[in-house]
Image (tube, grey):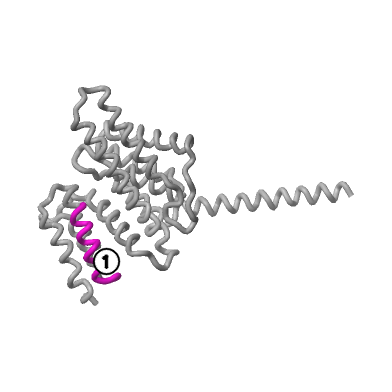
Amino acid sequence: MFQNIIDEEIKEEQSFDTENKKKRIINIKNLFSVYDFILYAISFMVSMVGFGDEFAPFGLAIFAAVCSNRIPAGIVYIVTCLGTLIGFGVNGFLSYLLTTLIFIVTILIFRPRFQDKDRNEKQKLGVYILISSFVVQAGKMFFTMFLVYDLLSSIMFSLLTYIFYKIFVNSVTVIKDYGIKKAFTVEEVIGASLLIAIAFYSLNRLNIFGLSISNILSIMLVLFLGWKYGMLVGATSGITIGMVLGIIGNSNPILVASYAISRNDSRNIK
C-alpha cells in the first residue's frame, strides 16, 4: 500500500518536472522568434538616435515600453545599452545606465498598477520613467554651475522620454504580435511606423550615390502604409514621421511636405 503511494508521488513529481521543462522551452522559444529579433534590432537602432548630442530619450522610452507590456526585457536592455554606448559614448551610456537603475528600483519599491490584460499598457510606468530621467538629468547640475538652461533641458528631456514612451507602448505590440494579431488600431499602426522610421534614422550616415538610405527607407514605409491602410493612415504617418525626423536631424521643413505627399499616389500602386 505504502509502496503504491510512493510510486504515485514519484510519478506526480516526474510529470510536474516534465511540465516545467516544457514551459521553460516554450519561454525560451518566445524570446528568439523572428519578431523578437526584429524588436531587438529596432531597439538597438533606436537607442543610437537622439536629438543632437544631448537628448537620447528613445532608448529609455522603448525599454520602459517593453517593461510596461510585460515583454521579457533582458535582451532589450542589453541591446539598448550597447546602442547608447555606440551612439553617445561613455557619458551617454552612464546616464542611461543610472536612469534605468533608478527606474527599476522605483518599480520594485512602488509597485505599479496593473491594467486590463487586453490593453497595451499593462503597467502604468510613465510616471516612473519621467521621474527617473529627470532625477538623473537634474542631478548633473549639482556637479556643475547651476544654469536655468540646464533645468529647462532636464524638464524637456523628461517630457520627451514620457511622450515617446506613450507612443512606443502602443507600438511594440505591433512588432511583437504581427504574426499573431490580425488587426491593429490606427494609433498602433502610426506609432509603429514612427518607431521604425526612427530606427531607420540610425542609418542616416549611409549614402549610396548621394542618396540617403534612411530617407529612402522612411519614404518606402510611408508608401507602404498608404497602399496597405489607405490615404488617412498614409498622410498622418507621413506628416508625423516627417516632423519627428526633421526635428531630430535639424532638416528643412520641406521634409514634412515630402513625406506627406508620398502617400498620394501610393493607392495606385498595384
Q: Answer with left or right where residue 89 lies relative to residue 175.
A: left
Q: Nearer the viewer, residue 255 or 30?
A: 255
Crowdedness near tag 1: few (<14), some (14–19) or many (≥20) residues, C-alpha within 10 Å: many
Q: Position of residue 120 (x, y in %)?
A: 42, 55
Q: Position of residue 19 (x, y in %)?
A: 64, 53
Residue at 28% over, 30% down: 138
Q: Is residue 108 visible?
A: yes
Q: Answer with left or right where residue 144 lies relative to residue 251.
A: right
Quadrant in which residue 221 is drawn: bottom left
Residue at 35% over, 37% down: 131
Q: Position of residue 263 (x, y in %)?
A: 20, 68
Q: Position of residue 86 (x, y in %)?
A: 27, 39
| Mark 1 lies on residue | 233
Quadrant in which residue 155 is drawn: top left
Q: Main secondary structure of the magenta part?
A: helix
Residue at 37% over, 58% down: 175
Element assignment for label 1: helix
Q: Is residue 241 magenta?
A: yes
Q: Nearer the viewer, residue 52 or 18?
A: 52
Magenta segment: 227-244
Q: Is residue 17 magenta?
A: no
